[in-house]
Image (cartoon, rainbow, N blue to C red):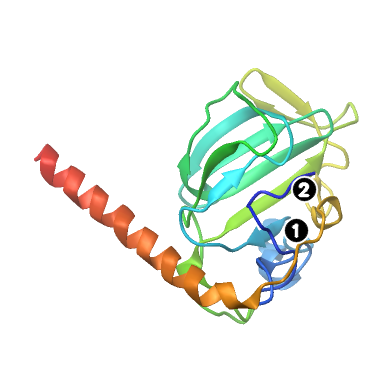
Amino acid sequence: MKEPIKDYVQEKYPKGHVSQWFGENPKLYAFLGLKGHNGIDIVAPYGTPILATSTQTIVEVKDNPSGYGKHIRAIDDTYEYTYGHLSEISVEVGDEAKVGYEIGKMGNSGFVVSGATPFWEYNPYAGTHLHFGVREIGGTDNWSIYGDYKVYIDNYPGFYKGAIDPEPLFALGDVDKKKHLMLTIISLSNQVISLLKKIIKKKQNV
């Protein structure tokens, strides 16, 4: 399976792009009925392209302000994928996204937390991150329905509501420590540009 961002480094920030691993922080997620975090949080600058990790069919495009914000769910023959907290979405339900195809952009929509907390030491890029979740397709008893798509999920609900650890599915990348300060500056600049565009558009419509 390919990584959802280019040059992904599968190590904890600041060495890599991961701010929260699968299964971490059980106390934080217990109120959701989870044993721990049910995905991987991947940090990169606001506006970073999000890429399809395999050739997938888009089954849900949704905006949930109190949850994953602007997010996408997609399926292939083996897994269901969740891409959460996006700033932009560039696909529609029913689209087939080839592996490596840009399906959206990194953002901080929905419920995100900016800054360090008791649960994670680093939360760079002003809370911007991708929640990437994976559930294995299979079985006959448990399913999720996305419009015309009925997806059977193994071991649902389970301790992680059917989610499995995506980490073993990726190839490890190379660490480059020198990029992170510049990436933070780029991320904040992208957010300012995005906000200015919205202000200009709003003024033009007045």
The quarter of the picture where residue 30 lies is bottom right
| Residue at image point 67% right, 51% down | 132
Task: Give me the C-alpha separation between circle 1 and circle 2.
Answer: 7 Å
Image quarter hosting the C terminus: top left
Which sits earlier in the primary sequence, circle 1 or circle 2? 1
Q: Which residue is mark 2?
A: 161
**Picture coordinates of residue 199, whole percent (x, y):** 20, 51
What's under tag 2, amino acid-wise? Lys
Q: Is residue 155 left or right of residue 84?
A: right
Above or below: residue 200 compared with residue 192: above
| Residue at image point 76% right, 62% down | 173
**Picture coordinates of residue 148, whole percent (x, y):** 64, 17
Secondary structure at badge 1 equals loop
Image quarter hosting the N terminus: top right
Above or below: residue 103 compared with residue 124: above
| Residue at image point 59% right, 55% down | 130
Residue 62 vs residue 83, the one in the foreground: 83
Q: Which residue is mark 1?
A: 34
The quarter of the picture where residue 10 lies is bottom right
**Picture coordinates of residue 108, whole percent (x, y):** 47, 57
Secondary structure at badge 2 equals loop
Mark 1–mark 2 contact, CB under 8 Å? Answer: yes
Q: Is residue 39 left or right of residue 45?
A: right
The quarter of the picture where residue 146 lies is top right
Q: Residues within 10 Å of mark 1 (few under 14, many from 20)?
A: some
Q: Residues within 10 Å of mark 2 (few under 14, many from 20)?
A: some
Above or below: residue 166 compared with residue 119: above
Residue 180 vs residue 62, the one in the foreground: 180
Q: Is residue 29 left or right of residue 113?
A: right
**Picture coordinates of residue 4, whole percent (x, y):** 66, 48
